[in-house]
Amino acid sequence: MSTEVKAPEAVRPSVTTPAPPARKKSPYPYWFYLPAAVIFFVFFVVPTFSSFFFSLTRWDLTSWEFIGLDNYVAFFQESALITGLKNTLIYAVVTCGLKVVLGMALALLLTSPIIGRGFLRSVVFFPVLVSTIGVGLTFQVLMDPSAGLINKSLALIGINGPAWLVDPKTALLSVALVDVWKGVGLATVIFIAGIVSIPREYFEAAATDGATAFQRFWRIILPLSKPATTTVIILALIGGLRSFDLIWAMTRGGPGFTSDVIASVIYKQYQAGFYGLSTAGNVVLFLLVTAIVFPLFQFFARQGVDQ
Amino acid sequence: MRFAKRWRPVSVIAAIAVCILALGACSAGSLGSNDEGGGTTLTFLVDNGEGSVKIGQGLAEAFHAKNPDITVQVQQRPGGSEGDNIVKTRLSTGEMTDVFLYNSGSLFQALKPQQNLTPLTGEAWAGQVEDIFKPTASVDNELYGAPITSSFGGGILYNKKVYEKLGLQVPTTWAEFMANNAKIKAAGIDPVIQSYQDTWTSQLLVLADYHNIAAADPGWAEKYTAGQVKYAQEPAVKGFQRLEEVHKAGYENKDYRSMKFDAGIKYLGAGKGAHYPMLGVAVGNLATSDPEHINDIGFFGQPGDDAAQNGTTLWLPAGLYIPKSTEGAQLDAAKKFVAFVASPEGCDTQTKAYPPAGPYMIKGCELPADVPAAVKDLEAYVKAGKVTPALEYLSPVKGPALEQITVEVGSGLRSAQDGAALYDKDVKKQAQQLGLKGWS
C-alpha cells in the first residue's frame, strides 16, 4: 500500500498532498454502482458480444446455426458493397466538407452585427429539429424532375433542371445537399460558440495594426476556433459515415444500387431476413467507422495538446 | 483476500444479470381460452390489407349468421416481413389464433407446417380444391390450407380503347407485342408504362415471364430450387432481355424513373399509355381511383416465343390454416369455418365483401357476370388451363434484390445478361441462408 503512494511523489516532488485516493477509499459502497452496472451489462455489454456471436451464425431470430465466417465472406462478395463503400466515403466527405465551409460562413455572418441576428440564428437551426424522414419525403416531392417545385422554378428562369434523385449521376449528391441543408445549423451553432469565445483583445489589436477583414479571419478566427472546427468535422464525418435515414427516405439506395451506402446495404440484408448476414455487416461498419474516426480524433487531440 | 473482495461485485452483477435474463425468457403471458357463455368464439388473424380485412369480416358475419352458436372474431396484423415474423413467432410460441390467413407457396413452406399446422387432407372440401392450388399449401401430399381470396394474373394490362382505335390484335408472341408497340408509338401514345419510383413494379416483365419459362422447360422450378438452372441461362434470361428491349426501343413513358404505381395505373386508364406490365390486383386500385375507365382495361399474359404455348402466369390465393394449438371444441368449430370458406357459398360471400381480381380456386365457384373486363380476360385463360403458377409458389428461392436489378436493367444502367447474372448471385445468397442443398 505504502509503496503505491510513494511512487507519484517521486515523480512530482512539488505535490505534497497524498496521491490519488486508493480504490479502497472510494466514498461509495460497491452496491451503489450496481444499478448502473446492471444496466450497462444488460443493455450494452450483452448485445455487443451477442452481435459478434450472431454475426457468425445463420440466424432467423428464433434459431441459429453456427457457420463460422461465411457471413463475412458473403458480405464482402455482395456486389453492392463496393458501390456502397465508395458512396459512403463520397457522402461523408461531401457533407462534412460542405458543412464545415457553409457552417463557418454562416457563423461569420451570424456573429457580425446584423439586424435580426437572434431570429436568423434560430432560422438556421430549425432544419436540425425537423424529422429526417419528413425532410426526405418533402424533398422527394420538391425534387421531382417534371412536377417538382425546384425544377419548375428553374424552368422559369430558363434552366433545364437535372433529374435529381432519379438520375444515377446526381442521386447521391442530391441527397447529400439535403443532408447539408438539414445539418448545417448544428455546425453553425458550434462555430458561433467557437467564434464568440475568442477574446475581444485580439480583434482590437488587429484593428490597431490595420488588419483587413480577410486577415482577421485567416489569422485570428480560423486558428482560434479550431476546437469548434474539430468538433464539427468529427460529428459531421461520423454522421456522414453512418447516414441512412435520409438516403432511405429519398432514394432507397436507388435508382438500382447507385446511391446505396453501407448502412443501406446492411438494412436490405436485414429486410430480407438475413439477420446473421446483416449483423456481420454491422460489425464491419462498426470497425470501419472506428478505423476512420479514431485516428482522426487522435490526430486532432495531439494537435490540441501541442497548442 | 483482496482478490476475492474485488471479484465479489462482479459475481453479484453476473448473478443479477442471469436472473434478469431468465425472467425475460419466460415473460410471455398466456392468452387464455376464448370460450364465452354458451357459444364458441373463434379468433381469426388476417393481414391488414384492405381486401383481406373486408373478406375476413364478410366471412365472419356470414358464418355467424349461418351458425349462431359460433362467433368469429377477426384480428389484424401488419403485412410484409413484419407480418411474417409475427405469424412465425405466434406459431412457435403456441399463441396463434384459432384460424389464420397467410400466403401460400414458399412463405407457407417456411411456417414448418408439419410441426405447426393441422392437416386438412381428410376434410370433405379438399376434393373441391383446384389442382393448381393444392401443391402450394401442401407438404408431402398432406394439405394444410384452404384457398381464401381470389387468384390474380401477372402479365400485361392494356388499354382496349387504344387497341380499338389503332386496330390492333392482342399479341400471342413477343414479336407481335413489339410490333404493336411500334404502331402505338407511331400514334403518339407511350407503348409501355414503367413506374420505377415504386421499385417493385419493375419486376413484372421478369416475374410474369415465368409461364414462358415453364412452357420451354416444364421442370424448371425444381431444377432451379436445386441450383441446377440459372436466370443467366436460356430460357429464363429472356425475361431480363425483354425488359432491356423495351428500354432500348424507347417504348416506356418519358418519366418512367419518377412515376409511381398510382400514377401509372391512372396513365393507363386515361389511355396515355397502352400497356402496363402489372399484377391483376391493380384493377382493384383502378376501381376506386378511376371507376369510369375500369372496363377500358383488358389483360393478356406476357407473350413468349411460341404462339401455341401462349398463356399467363397466375398468382394464387392465400391459404386459411388451423394451427396445432387449436384443440377440442375450438378445433371442430374452426374446421366448420374453413369448410364454409372453401365452399361456393364462401366464394360468393368473398365476392360480396371485396371485388375479386380473378377466379377462386374452389371447383363450382363462379365469378359474377359484372366483373371488370381484365378479370374476365384472366378467367378465360384459367378456364382454358393456359396458366402456370408464379415461381414464388413453386420454389422457395427468390432473391431480395430483384427489384433493384430490374430497375437497373429497365433504365439501361446494366445489360440484361449482367443483370440476370447478378440476380443469380443474389438468389444464391438467399438459398444459402435457407440452407438448401446444391448451393454451397
Image: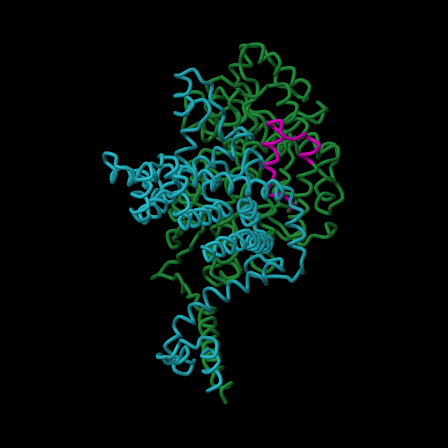
Chain colours: A cyan, B green
- Rendered location of residue A121, percent (x, y): 29, 40
- Rendered location of residue A122, percent (x, y): 28, 41
Say whether residue B308 is visible: yes
- Please give the range of residues in magenta: B397-420
Q: Is residue B286 above or below residue B4?
A: above
Outermost front residue = A209
**Which of A26/A192 is in front?**
A192
Q: Quadrant of residue B384?
A: top right
- Location of the C terminus of chain A (image quadrant): bottom left
Q: Quadrant of residue B186?
A: top right
Question: At x 64% / y 48%, what residue is drawn?
Answer: B430
Outermost bottom residue = B1
- Rendered location of residue A264, percent (x, y): 53, 44
**Which of B285/B67 is in front?**
B285
Q: Is residue A122 magenta?
A: no
Question: At x 53% / y 10%, what residue is drawn?
Answer: B165
Q: Quadrant of residue B405?
A: top right
